[in-house]
Image (tube, rainbow, N blue to C red):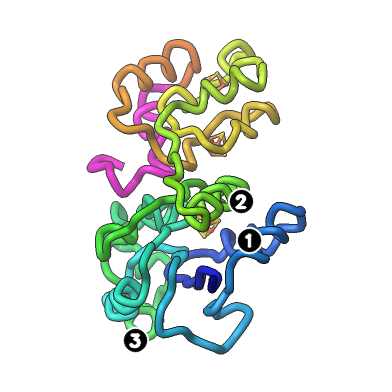
Amino acid sequence: MSKPKVGFFDFASCEGCQIELTNYGDAAFVELLNHIDIVEFREAMTETAEHLTIACIEGSFTREADRGRLENIRERSDIVIAYGACASTAGVNALKNHQKDFRKDVYGEDRNMPHLYSNDRAVPISEVIKVDYNVYGCPMDKYEFLDIVSHLVHGKEPVIPNHPVCIECKHNETICRYFEGDHCLGPVARAGCRAPCPADGIPCEACRGFVDNPNEEAMEKVLIKKGKLPEARAKHKSRIFTAFCRSDA
Ligand code: SF4
Ligand code: SF4
Ligand code: SF4
């Protein structure tokens, strides 16, 4: 039986998630390589493939010129995975959606050069083509990526977490940041990362985005009352990684 053909593609991103991928040194990833054929990966090879079993896409869509390339990847692929915050939620790239003069601020006098042109908004890949699975996080969690791809390679349905980071914190028996006089977005942040930030003594910034239907109003109150954040800061606290879905970021 032939192995699933897997390709990796990048759009607007810092390529940090690809670095996470190439950082794999553990036996589980080496074992996965025995079960897939990597047939397209710009960072590592020049070959391209007519058909892909799984296309893994990093980065947001923010240049109209990229639309054709994205559609072509979808047409050639049975399954599309958007990996990393940039691809799955538009991540930090979506902060520009709320900055009127971002071209001027970033590129100054060079802002009208054709190769620097981008759309006014950065959006998740799912806004342009059908995405079958998202691997959240900035950077994505490499073990979650491995788990999702392993499930797909074995014909099983992966489970994408939709519970808050607090649950993983409790599993780790980590002392809550709020008990340390700190703040944290864990109650509304999507889990799946195993809560490394609170375990390291820093607040969760919801880099994986929010759970479905988060109670943002209650979160804001907790940030003010228990986290001691000024009202204005509490209001915008979560915008770093959720700017795409916010109208007031
Ligand atoms: S999700 Fe974060 S680490 Fe990954 S490409 Fe985007 S900015 Fe870089
Ligand atoms: S530290 Fe953050 S994620 Fe952990 S339990 Fe407290 S609020 Fe939840
Ligand atoms: S704890 Fe929060 S900020 Fe840290 S990796 Fe998980 S979701 Fe991201």
Mark 1 or 2, nearer chain start: 1
Residue receiving disc 1:
21
User: Residue at 34% of width from left, 86% of height from top?
Assistant: 114
Report how far apart the C-alphas of labels 3 and 1 lie in the structure.
Answer: 31 Å
Residue receiving disc 3:
114
User: Residue at 29% of width from left, 56% of height from top?
Assistant: 97
Residue receiving disc 2:
142
Q: Position of residue 146 (x, y in %)?
A: 59, 52
Q: Establish if 54 lies above or below 221.
A: below
Evaluate if marks 1 and 2 touch, with contact meaning CB atoms under 8 Å apart.
yes
Mark 3 or 1, nearer chain start: 1
Nearest-to-viewer mark from 3 and 1: 1
User: Residue at 44% of width from left, 19% of height from top?
Assistant: 223
Tell me if 227 is positioned left or right of 101 in this view: right
Q: Please name the predominant secondary structure of the magenta segment in the image.
A: helix
Q: Position of residue 127 (x, y in %)?
A: 25, 59
> In the rendered structure, which amino acid carries the disc numbered 1?
Leu
Quick one: label 1, few (<14), some, or many (20+) residues within 10 Å? some
Report how far apart the C-alphas of labels 2 and 3 lie in the structure.
Answer: 35 Å
> In the rendered structure, which amino acid carries the disc numbered 3?
Pro
Residue most extreme to the left: 247
Magenta residue check for 247 = yes
Determine the secondary structure under disc 1: helix
Residue most extreme to the front: 1
User: Residue at 49% of width from left, 16% of height from top?
Assistant: 228
User: Magenta residues?
Assistant: 230-249
Evaluate if marks 3 and 1 touch, with contact meaning CB atoms under 8 Å apart.
no
